[in-house]
Image (cartoon, rainbow, N blue to C red):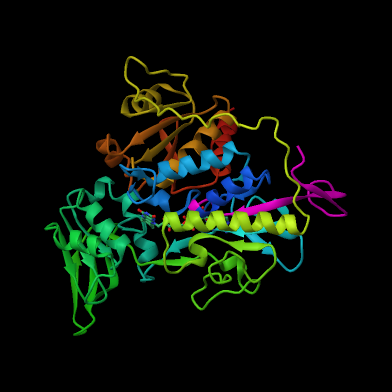
Amino acid sequence: MVASAPLPGSTHGSPSEVVIENLVIVGSGPAGYTAAIYAARANLAPLLITGFQRGGIPGGQLMTTTHVENYPGFPDGILGPELMDRCKAQALRWGTKLVEADAESLDLSSRPYRLVTSEGETIWTHSLILATGASANRLGIKEEERFWSRGISACAICDGATPQFRKEQLAVVGGGDSACEEAVYLTKYGSQVHLIVRSQSLRASAAMADRVLANPAIIVHWNREVLAGLGEDWLSAIRLRDRTTGATDDLPVRGLFYAIGHTPNTELLQGQLELDEKGYLVTRPGRPETSLEGVFAAGDVADAEWRQGITAAGSGCQAALAAERWLSHHQLARPVERQNIEPEPAGATEPTATSDAGNFDAAALWQKGGYALRKLYHDSEKPLLVVYTSPSCGPCHVLKPQLKRVLDELSGRALGVEIDIEADPEIAQQAGVTGTPTVQLFFNKQLQQQWQGVKQRREFKAAIEALTAASA
Ligand SMILES: Cc1cc2nc3c(=O)[nH]c(=O)nc-3n(C[C@H](O)[C@H](O)[C@H](O)COP(=O)(O)OP(=O)(O)OC[C@H]3O[C@@H](n4cnc5c(N)ncnc54)[C@H](O)[C@@H]3O)c2cc1C
């Protein structure tokens, strides 16, 4: 298969030649994966940089939501992470190449374009689709760092189910669709949810606003802004200011969830491509072409207005078709030759069964539930990775396969257990888990290290290898 052309005299791989990709796509949200599906089906063997931490997790914003009810083709709705898994599987099935990393820098000053990943890899490409989406905004209050994951969170869907929030007073700040959705969602867990709105009205769709206003478990605080977070080890209250009178008061809450909009992920592009005053990529009206030849934009990164899964996917399709035409026009495309016209079906992955006395396996690399945790904690002499997840947490969904790969690569030198904090809340409480995903590494019944959020595989691997080397 010829996917790309060698460029003499450059430095990537061997000193004498580099590979130039037909098309690199940056971002793995609905825009990036749709672009990949179209480009892969056009035999361009696109290379997709999934993103990892810098501008959101692989799979993009829909990994942080539960039910997506408005994406066509799913009459009963679909979970955001499941939708993104399906997009990924479809892109892979047709021959997309994935790089699980962030794009750290881009050089668009000459062609072929050059990109360096967070893993230090340099990639050259004739054309580029930028689908880096947008990131959740933070309030920027002084106590944010101190209470981050200790009461303050930017993802109600990910963290709402943690034991510390159960039957507690919770607050959501924001007045749009996300804020309303999160407030409604949190009523499943909190005793009362306070929605803090800067103005006198909600910006959410009418249907969503009606749901919030009709919900007796939600109290809306109009014309308020959050000035500070209060508490010792954990957030216990927030200080609010009435924007009409200037009066302040403290609202006792154990959780504060941000839902205050997004900033486009265009940091890498500053000074290289035309951006608007809010930082969104500027394209030709109604088209995916940016201010540079061969560089196309798709999804929320170039869309301050519609910002939906389906609009992102639609623009990903446009960008891929435009890139294909541009490559053909400039006679740059090097299509792959397929052995099989119809690729193998993508297949489905089976969920892990919860272990009990009947199916527990002391040698299994990955098990689930409190029974397996107790057995391995007490009886196993190997390092034990415990990941605490909740069913609707997209980042957990991203992290689990990474951890399984680490354990595979270590060929049985360490074992893993998943604890669903909804199924085992007492275990999560005992372990002091304050959000999902949390990973704890145990060895000789001692907690050695703890991580929160999605981290690179190499961090877990290095920690385990250090333990096994020290004990050898
Ligand atoms: C809580 C919530 C609920 C939502 N619910 C719905 C819904 O029900 N229906 C609906 O249609 N829409 C919904 N949306 C909106 C929808 O998620 C977005 O419009 C859509 O995900 C945008 O897709 P995208 O591909 O443009 O970007 P994103 O989904 O934001 O994906 C961006 C991708 O770029 C990657 N990236 C960023 N920076 C870099 C970098 N430097 N290097 C490499 N990769 C990078 C990220 O890792 C990510 O993979 C919701 C959004 C939120 C936040």
- Please state if 335 lies on the left or on the right of 399 as rendered: right
Specify the farthest residue to the bottom: 245
Q: Position of residue 268 (x, y in %)?
A: 60, 66
Residue 3 part of the magenta segment:
yes
Q: Residue at horizontal 73%, vertical 37%?
A: 337
Quadrant for the N terminus in the image? top right
Q: Residue at horizontal 52%, vertical 73%?
A: 279
Residue 164 part of the magenta segment:
no
Q: Residue at horizontal 45%, vertical 69%?
A: 304
Specify the farthest residue to the left: 216
Quadrant for the C terminus in the image? top right
Q: Is residue 162 visible?
A: yes
Q: Which residues are magenta?
A: 1-30
Looking at this view, is 323 or 397 the one in front?
Answer: 323
Against 289, residue 344 (above or below) is above
Looking at this view, is 118 or 90 the one in front?
Answer: 90
Q: Position of residue 260 (x, y in %)?
A: 35, 67
Against 60, residue 349 (above or below) is above
Q: Position of residue 291 (x, y in %)?
A: 64, 72
